[in-house]
Amino acid sequence: MTRTFLSPRFFSLLALLSMSSLALTGCDFLEQFEEELAIPEQTEAAEPGAPAGDDHDEGDCDSPGENDQSDGGADENDEGDSSSDGDASDPLTPLPSNCEGGPAPLQMTTLRTREEARAFGEAYTSADTVFIEGLELTDLDDLVCLDEIRSLVVSDTVLERAELPFVTSVGSVLFEDNVNLRLISMPRVESMGHLDVLRNPRLVRVRIAAATEIDRRVNIEENQELRLVDLSSTELVSHFTVADNPSLRSLEVANVEEAYSVVITGNRLAGTVDLSSLRTVTAGLRVEANEELTEVHLDSLQSVNEGLVWAQGLAFTGNPSLEQLQMPFLTVVNGHFTIGANDRLSRVEVVRMEHIGIPFTPCERACMRGWLGISDNPQLTELTFPALVAVARNITVINNDSLENLDGFPSLQIVRSVLRVSDNDSLQDISGLFALESVGSWASPVGPDRGGYRIHDNSSLPIEQAEHLAYNIIGENNIGGGGIFIR
């Protein structure tokens, strides 16, 4: 028979629980007693064929972050994953009572060993610039008392967990080339300047769920096993890039309202990316080459690149699982608006936008930028731009094999440069363009030698419709010097 000897801390804990039972759930009670008794974790073998991550009955006591829905369905028991990847710290845990240090000197501090980290953590509650280096530290637990850091750099270490449960403000954070790092967690950070997470090959989760503002940059790139990025409270961000994370399934950014630029490219992204609060993008928004992305919620988006900051305004390209695009409140896109090479995309609906680019502004500098390009979407059947009146440069509709008509452009009157409709094998009817009045001739002072009308190689389209639109509706004199090409 094995005897378990109970420490004085056990009886103190029992007394505390009896006085504050309303504050603790049964799970909290059980976890604290298991910790005191050092009860070994009992792990039952999964039944053959049972799906990973489904071995918890309803009501089980999961560690914080282990079984969240916010993980976007990521399999919790993937090869190489472990329970330590979940957040070990409860964000409601009170600050340890022994945190009595003060601010560190305004200087750079390099921590390489456990002894150095412990001494620093015992002495200070805030820090200027901290470098974590070397091959000894595997966690940041000795820095638990820190509540403010001006700059944190963790580079080329063997760190496994980077948890800073009580930090509320960070100026800049860099995690790069940490071969064993699995978790980054800062549950109480409310504001941040830079967040750079680069080339951490085993990183699984980034949780900074309380930060409302990241005012300079988020750059999360080339993390091969990253599955979850939680920035669920962030409302304002400057440059936002999440790129080339091939295992990333869940990106939680539903509260972002404003951004300078947004780039989401080269990720797995199973299901939906929720950007439903996003209203304004100052420069460009690109969603490209995300393997399993089926939908992007852009329910509030109103303007992209209004000041013509970038040539590339809005792009959705190379997302093989994307099924539809709806932007019900979008009214301004300057620069190029491109939708291309989305294998399953069937529907595009932009109901309020009247102009692409700045079509009625004299072309002194860059005002011609405004291009609607829709190409290589083999399942596309529905294009809906009912309010669109003018495009400041080109419209191209190319190689969309299932598109049968262009009825979604009933108000389009002016294309200042080139209209090209070609290689759409199912296209039978272009009468939706019969409101056109001018193609290319509005390109002053560049035109009338710029622009042109090119409708060709649409195998199901009667040539007579293309000729009727060019010669009888628009009129040869209202087509730019690039001329008319029909085939």
Image (cartoon, rainbow, N blue to C red):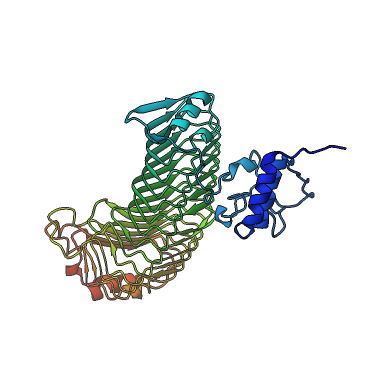
Image x and y of residue 400, in percent: 44, 61
Position above or below: 475 against 191 = below
Q: Quadrant of residue 202?
A: top right
Q: Is residue 390 left or right of residue 321?
A: left
Q: Quadrant of residue 408?
A: bottom left
- The quarter of the picture where the N terminus appears is top right
Q: Nearer the viewer, residue 62 or 289?
A: 62
Image x and y of residue 237, in percent: 35, 51
Q: Can residue 58 be seen from the camera position used here?
A: yes
Position above or below: 262 against 276 = above
Q: Is residue 395 left or right of residue 252?
A: left
Q: Can residue 113 be seen from the camera position used here?
A: no
Image x and y of residue 9, in percent: 66, 41
Q: Nearer the viewer, residue 143 or 332?
A: 143
Residue, far right: 1
Position above or below: 386 against 256 = below
- The quarter of the picture where the C terminus appears is bottom left
Q: Nearer the viewer, residue 174 or 463?
A: 174
Q: Is residue 46 left or right of residue 464?
A: right
Q: Is residue 173 left or right of residue 24?
A: left
